[in-house]
Amino acid sequence: MTDIGLGEARVDKVASNRRILGPDGKVRATRWTATVDPAIRAEPEGVIDPIVSLVSFWNGERPVAVLSYYATHPQSYYRTGIPNPDFPGIARFLRRLAVPAALHVHFNGAGGNIGAGKYNDGSPENRLLLAERLADGMRRAWENTTRHPIAAADVTWTIEPVALPPAKHLAIDKLESQLKDRDPTFLTQGGASRLAWLRRCQAGHQMDVVCLGLGRARILHLPGELFVEYQLAAKAERPDLFVAMAAYGDYAPWYIGTAAAYEQGGYETSPASSNVAPEVEGVLRAAIRKLLQTRP
């Protein structure tokens, strides 16, 4: 590789926050990725990261690969029994047709509390509309790309091991009893995943938060269905750098909210959906900060 390219653009009418707060500061409604209720769809977008980030690799004038990063649940309609890449995969394919020389790889950002629900009622035709909107953002990010020469010395891979605090509602004795008794809820409610997670925690297992450095770019890789606030905080931490994030790495924690979100209630931070405690925010924010402050 001789150069890397860095580009960003705003994506309109795709992402919206799933968590609708009431006057008391608690979650009063969830705006699912497919939301039928027009009143819930009409609520403001809320906190999102509207930016799609592109990192491209070049050999002279030839683009070799394009990595894209965007934060949202990657769903429009689902549970059809037919595997498909949904709208982000279609957007990626459209960009592949436009720039066929390069390999195109898409990463989902910190979209745990983000979905297309404001702009999607679950109608099948919305899949292509959402894909075209995301692809348009990718196109403009590609057109906005600036290229920078890169050498081996400009590439870094930094790891920060972290021990995430398990949720207090999880009890290993109960899970092991359900396993022994062949309780059907052990399978239907993710008991195997939760038991494995608790055993990892008890054994002192740490998971890696990783930062790939490419010149002035920093690409963070984090676990779980991470809330978008972590991505926004990472970008605010180093506004002098090009920061992108891929979440959904190690899925053992399930949803990872902010400390405040666990007080607000709602689906994502409920005992049914999250395997970590509110203190997780301090652990991950510290790791992100340390990785972004490390000089190559």
Image (cartoon, rainbow, N blue to C red):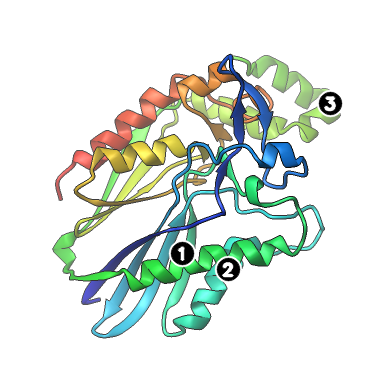
Residue at the image position 78 percent from the left and 22 percent from the top: 178
Tell me the amino acid under the disc marked 2. Glu
Q: Determine whether the residue tagged by mark 1 lies in a helix, strand or loop.
A: helix
Determine crowd level at label 3: few under 14, some 14-19, many 20+ residues with C-alpha closer than 10 A. Answer: few
**Residue on which disc 1 sits:** 137
Query: Total of numbered circles in the picture?
Result: 3
- Residue mark closest to the camera, 2 vs 3: 2
Image spot of residue 119 (x, y percent): 64, 51
**Residue on which disc 2 sits:** 132
**Residue on which disc 3 sits:** 183
How far is mark 2 from mark 3, CA to CA? 45 Å
- Residue mark closest to the camera, 1 vs 3: 1
Tell me the amino acid under the disc marked 1. Gly
Depth check: give the residue in front, 9 or 248.
9
How far is mark 1 from mark 3, CA to CA? 47 Å
Tell me the amino acid under the disc marked 3. Asp
Q: Determine whether the residue tagged by mark 3 lies in a helix, strand or loop.
A: loop
Marks 2 and 1, the one that precedes in the sequence: 2
Depth check: give the residue in front, 232 or 269.
232
Depth check: give the residue in front, 88 or 210.
88
Image spot of residue 156 (x, y percent): 23, 55
How far is mark 2 from mark 1, CA to CA? 9 Å
The quarter of the picture where the N terminus appears is: bottom left
Residue at the image position 18 percent from the left and 42 percent from the top: 294
Is residue 37 shown left or right of residue 48? right
Is residue 230 shown left or right of residue 121? left
